Image (cartoon, rainbow, N blue to C red):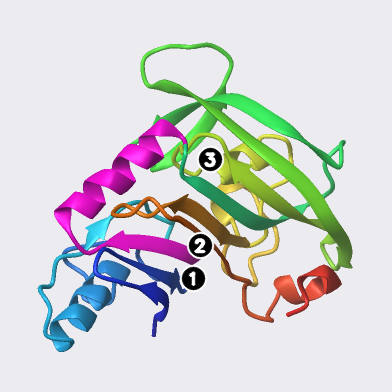
Amino acid sequence: MIDILYEDKQIIVCIKPPGMLSASGKEETSVDMVLQKHREEAGEAGFIGVAHRLDRGTGGLMVFAKTQAAAAALSREIQSGMFQKEYLAVVHGVPDNSAGIYTDLLFKDAKKNKSFVVQRERKGVRKASLKYKVLETAETRHGVVSLIRIRLQTGRTHQIRVQFSSRKMPLLGDGKYGSKDNGCQIALWSCRLAFAHPKNQKKIDMEASPKAEYPWNLFSCLNL
């Protein structure tokens, strides 16, 4: 159910399938619960620390801590901005520039579990920034779509989804933020993680591609 790409005494790096919760104490099929069971079957303690999360519909690379100390170290690295996260996304339309930076002010509506771009700072508003590069475009029955590689500079709720949607480029499969093509999961994939190992500080740098299915199979550059 879950592919484990790397594991030692401190961390587990795995691939979260789209449609699966990252973490939930009430759902046995969430990633953290599956990894706890994996540890118990190996005769280890069942602690799994959630370093970061992916939305249910998003798949790809995640790292989990196997000790409290490792969890704290990963959390500090994320907070410092040294923990690198890159994504692939498929969006409706084509950005005006082939590469660039999007910076916005985001407000999260907790009741609706939805974020919005706003024009001024106020309570609950946080700055969001990402770098992007268009890799390839393709034609679909819904019009031209773009494959984009993204590096997050901040980590806000639904950040990638809302920043592109606010520019009239919602992600395919993301009806919540305006997609008209909902024949797939949200077209967002965690493709790269780069961080210092919490114990020995050795650099961990891992990449993974999505499965050869729609809409990822529209793009030859992915070599799926």
**Can residue 59 be found in the magenta stretch?**
yes
Q: Which residues are magenta?
A: 58-81
Answer few, some or many: residues within 10 Å of disc 3's Cα (few below 14, many 20 plus, some between 14 and 19): many
Helix, strand or loop status at disc 3: helix
Quick one: quadrant of the C terminus? Answer: bottom right
- Left or right of residue 210: residue 176: left
Q: Which labelled disc corresponds to residue 58?
A: 2
Q: Is residue 87 above or below residue 47?
A: above
Quick one: quadrant of the N terminus? Answer: bottom left
- The one nearer the camera, 105 or 83, is 83
Q: Which labelled disc corresponds to residue 18?
A: 1
Q: Earlier in the sequence, mark 2 or mark 1?
A: 1
Answer few, some or many: residues within 10 Å of disc 1's Cα (few below 14, many 20 plus, some between 14 and 19): many
Where in the figure is residue 21, as x and y percent of width and height?
A: 35, 65
Q: Residue at x 13, y 82 (%)?
A: 40
Q: Quadrant of residue 111?
A: top left
- Left or right of residue 85: residue 134: right
Q: CA distance from mark 3 to mark 1?
A: 17 Å
Q: Residue at x 67, y 56 (%)?
A: 89
Helix, strand or loop status at disc 2: loop
**Badge 3 vs badge 1, beta-carbon distance below 8 Å:** no
**Can residue 202 be found in the magenta stretch?**
no
